[in-house]
Amino acid sequence: MGSHEVIQQIAKRLGRDKRILVAFSGGIDSSVLLHALVTLRSEQHSDLQLRAIYVHHGLSRYAQAWAEHCRAQCAQWQVPFQVVHVDVDPSEAGIEAAAREARYQAISALLNDGEVLATAQHLDDQCETFLLALKRGSGPAGLSAMPFNMPFGVHRQIRPMLDISRLQIEDYAKKNGLSWVEDDSNQDARFDRNFLRLQILPAIAQRWPHFSNMVSRSAGLCAEQESLLDELLAPDLSRLMSADGAMDIDGLVHVSEMKRRAILRRWLSQHQVLMPSQEQLEKLWHEVALSKLDAEPVLQLGMYQVRRYRQRLYLLPLFQGIESVVLAWRGETSLMLPDCLGQLTLAESGIHVRAPTIEEKVTVRFSAPGSLTVRVTDRRHSRELKKLWQELGVPPWLRQRTPLLFYGEILIAAIGLFVTLEGQSVADKPVWCIHYDKNIA
């Protein structure tokens, strides 16, 4: 495959996409991808709109020099270029996964409407990804490896070089006189992917020259099987999911174990959760779904958590612990709530409570003793707060994320849910009308 064939293969994979953000590291793979796109723009598709981004992890002492190389290359090729700095926290998933997650989060935030992300993974990368999934004991979903086209947050990611081998990329770079940076960490065989690239795949290729092509074919067949399962299980998934995205436990009890695992995987994948292992799926079912009725089980899956409430499974983001937060407020300005919970504002619409007296200290809190006795304005009898939460159907995790308005130590209202008798507005007396905007982040 010569240079022209490489360019045409990339053009074929682009399809109708014309607005492209290239993840540009300065390495040989992304250099070939960007050069091919620039060539396409100048020779065939003048309407192609290109941008390039370099993600600066700060993990290598050469990172700044690589960024400057990318900047100079993009200036030469007349491609708008941007450097974005990210912090990498390897404590949870390891340095490779943490760097990848930080990189993708940064890029996702910078994609424009109608723009797609183009990354430079190629045929040999696909083979490595397949073997790494095999090492982890992955099923067909994991062995599907990398698709050509996939969702990327609210955008899409494309990999136009997945049919092109590393040797073909190297040949293209040499024939076109490209310069690129060499990441020293690529020679470190302590990393699993480098170990495969440096020590395993060359030996395999020597014995079976078309091994990577066959692996790509197998990955494609696995992806086809997964697509078929998606189609066949879609009615079950729709039937078992409520409007708020929760999963019906009782409905899952009556299907086979294999079918239940497949449904749960698809439920999680709809939220782009990293696919759990079979062991994690078993924990989800036995330790969360089937735990004692009075338990409040939690299973963390990456940046998400699975909880149970009233025989339903809920997939939620990880929350900050805000139980001890106490915010003073007199209503003069909007009150921003912690952990992206929104803001409170005195306005013309919202809940009505009596205005505080000058002597009363106004605070907003996120916890109160469950034994606290509360009488709601439209009820004849007082109830313990814990019982009231249950009657209102408020899940346990939201009971400590609902803004509670206090005057002194008296609970006045749970914003958006109820007003207590002590907070009831009175005719001809000053009133606060509190608007709760949950869409402010």
Image (cartoon, rainbow, N blue to C red):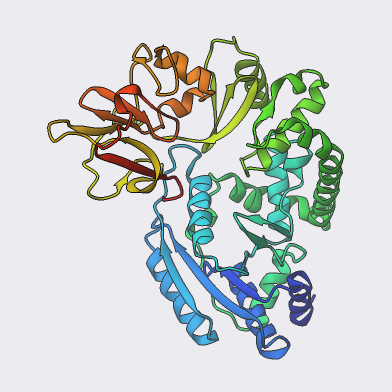
**Residue 434 place in picture, x, y as percent:** 35, 42
Q: Position of residue 150 (x, y in %)?
A: 70, 56
Q: Nearer the viewer, residue 89 or 193?
A: 89
Q: Is residue 14 left or right of residue 380?
A: right
Relative vertical location of residue 260 with respect to residue 332 in this rendering, above or below = above
Residue 231 falls in image quadrant: top right
Regarding residue 137, the answer to whether it shows in the image is no
The residue that appears at 59% across and 73% down in the rendered structure is: 31
Q: Is residue 115 above or below residue 220?
A: below
Above or below, 186 against 292 in this view is below
**Rendering coords of residue 276 (x, y %):** 64, 33
Q: Nearer the viewer, residue 233 or 55?
A: 233
Please provide percent x and percent y for residue 169.
69, 70
Residue furthest out toward the front:
428
**Is 189 on the left or on the right of 351, as rendered?**
right
Left or right: residue 127 versus residue 310 is right
The residue located at (74%, 64%) in the rendering is: 165
Q: Foreground residue, 336 or 20?
A: 336
Q: Is residue 17 visible?
A: yes
Number of callouts in the render?
0
The quarter of the rendered structure image containing the N terminus is bottom right
